[in-house]
């Protein structure tokens, strides 16, 4: 009985070691950059649906107004602004889809090299660079806003540091 148990455990160990040496067929699903782009895209698609509903509602409200109503111009201007925002959201979604496809292709090209060389995947340094670039891209654009933000960071640093 114990001999059968030893043989069974040996076979199990061999199968487990053989099964672990295969490359991941979908390495992008472990890539934090790909996952971040995907989550941004999902959020943007939700915002697009909301904006589309808002534009449709404003179009219907505008059609309900009588021809001589003084609010027509104001409502038309609001509708035009919302349509412009919707167009921008759609452009951003298209950009993110392209960025997601490029990242997927990049990961699928680079991952086999990491797997062969037994390097850790995903690359943490690359993700840190991505986060920094994203922070700069999303951050405030004007110098005055950046200066205020920097002052807040400096103030927090002074408050948290121990006084001598």
Image (tube, rainbow, N blue to C red):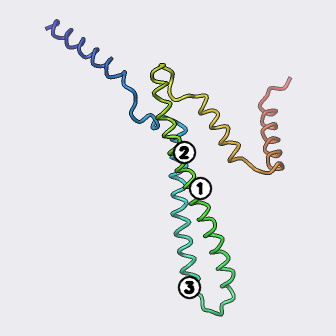
Residue 21, label in figure: none
Task: Give the camera-side residue of 60 and 22.
Answer: 22
Q: Which residue is mark 1?
A: 92
Badge 2 element: helix
Q: Is residue 24 left or right of residue 106?
A: left
The picture places residue 138, in percent across and down from the top left corner, at 68, 47
Q: Residues within 10 Å of mark 3 (few under 14, many from 20)?
A: few
Q: Are marks 1 and 3 in contact (CB under 8 Å)?
A: no
Q: Which residue is mark 3?
A: 63
Q: Quadrant of residue 115?
A: top left
First in sequence: mark 3 or mark 2? 2
Task: Give the camera-side residue of 113 and 46.
Answer: 113
* Residue at 63% across, 67% down: 84
Q: Is residue 66 left or right of residue 155?
A: left
Q: Which residue is mark 2?
A: 37
Q: Is residue 6 left or right of residue 42?
A: left
Q: Residues within 10 Å of mark 2 (few under 14, many from 20)?
A: some
User: Marks 2 and 1, how far apart in space?
Assistant: 12 Å
Q: Nearer the viewer, mark 1 or mark 3?
A: 1
* Residue at 20% across, 14% down: 8
Task: Give the camera-side residue of 28 and 131.
Answer: 28
Quarter of the figure with the C terminus: top right
In the image as oriented, which residue stretches furthest toward the right? 164
In the image, residue 88 above or below residue 26: below
* Residue at 80% across, 26% down: 162
In the image as oriented, which residue stretches furthest toward the bottom? 68
Q: Are marks 3 and 2 in contact (CB under 8 Å)?
A: no
The picture places residue 60, in percent across and down from the top left corner, at 53, 80
User: Marks 3 and 2, how far apart in space?
Assistant: 39 Å
């Amino acid at each position: 009985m114990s001999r059968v148990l030893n043989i069974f455990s040996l076979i199990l160990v061999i199968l487990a070691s053989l099964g672990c040496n295969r490359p991941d067929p979908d390495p992008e699903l472990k890539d934090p950059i790909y996952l971040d782009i995907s989550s941004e895209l999902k959020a943007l698609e939700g915002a697009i649906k909301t904006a589309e509903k808002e534009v449709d509602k404003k179009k219907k409200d505008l059609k309900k107004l009588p021809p001589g109503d003084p609010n027509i111009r104001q409502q038309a201007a609001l509708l035009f602004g919302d349509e412009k925002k919707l167009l921008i959201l759609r452009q951003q979604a298209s950009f993110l889809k392209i960025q997601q496809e490029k990242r997927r292709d990049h990961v699928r090209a680079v991952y086999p090299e990491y797997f062969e060389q037994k390097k850790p995947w995903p690359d943490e340094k690359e993700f840190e660079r991505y986060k920094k670039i994203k922070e700069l891209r999303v951050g405030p654009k004007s110098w005055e806003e950046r200066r205020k933000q920097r002052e807040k960071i400096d103030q927090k640093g002074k408050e948290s540091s121990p006084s001598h």
